[in-house]
Amino acid sequence: MESSGRAAVFDVDGTLVDTNHLHVVAWWEAFRQAGHDVPMHAVHRAVGLPSTDLVAHLLGEDRDTDQDADISAGHKALYGQYFDRLPPLPEAGALLRRLHRDGWTVVLATSAGGAELSALRRAIDADEAISATASADDVDQGKPAPEPVEHALELVGVPAERAVFVGDTVWDMQAGSRAGVRCVGVLCGGIPRADLEESGADAVYADPAHLLSALGDGALA
């Protein structure tokens, strides 16, 4: 299916919903319960990687991999406590609805699935504007591999040259760059502007509200 339109692909955590630091605390506690003292700033830099990759990134390839599943399950249980109150970032839903009205095909590309994805979509509250969702369950490799972005575009039949990917981490910018799409960074996930630009961001905005206010002449004009 080939579309003549254009696609705006969005990461979700830290981009549309203010969850990065909730993830940091949940991962920190999961590591602590497994006997690992991992600094929160290091966890923060790794947020956005798929669970197994995040554990490997923080504990190293020589870790006891038998613990991986328990650490991931611990994070999932701890983070799940927040599902009923995940805070959307300013104007996140309004941004998606406006892009949809302006003729963009809006797609989510996230490592979340199941109940977590449902909770995130409730927080954004713009289901009518979202054409498709590419979850980590749908691809072999998560970000920074290009597959999540490529899969998102396949779902809506839009070629990379007619797409923009909006995200908040270096993993997002690397994935988008490798997929051949224009990358837009947001600072609301807590990653510095310079890091996003070095990883491939063509433009950087504060948050969804800033991106919405700049739609007329910005990266999504």
Image (cartoon, rainbow, N blue to C red):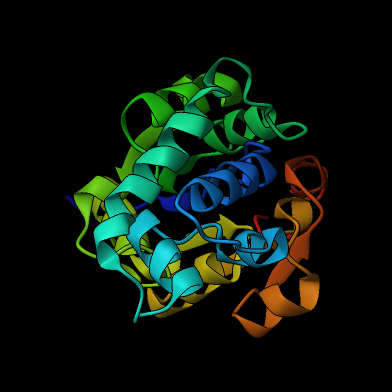
34 lies left or right of 98: left
1 lies left or right of 52: left
At a point 53% along the width and 43% down the height, the residue shown is 12
Can residue 216 be seen here? no
Can residue 100 be seen here? yes
* Residue found farthest to the bottom: 198
Q: Position of residue 30 (x, y in %)?
A: 50, 46
Task: In the rendered view, tell whether residue 52 sits above or below residue 104.
Answer: below
The number of callouts visible is 0
* Residue found farthest to the top: 84
Q: Position of residue 139 (x, y in %)?
A: 22, 57
Task: In the rendered view, tell whether residue 19 sits above or below residue 6.
Answer: above
Question: Quarter holding the C terminus?
Answer: bottom right
At a point 17% along the width and 50% down the height, the residue shown is 1
Q: Position of residue 146 (x, y in %)?
A: 35, 71
At a point 78% along the width and 71% down the height, the residue shown is 193
**The image quarter in which residue 94 lies:** top right
* Residue found farthest to the front: 35
Q: Nearer the viewer, residue 63 or 188?
A: 63
Q: Nearer the viewer, residue 49 or 209?
A: 49
Q: Nearer the viewer, residue 76 or 205?
A: 76
**The image quarter in which residue 150 lies:** bottom left
At a point 71% along the width and 78% down the height, the residue shown is 195
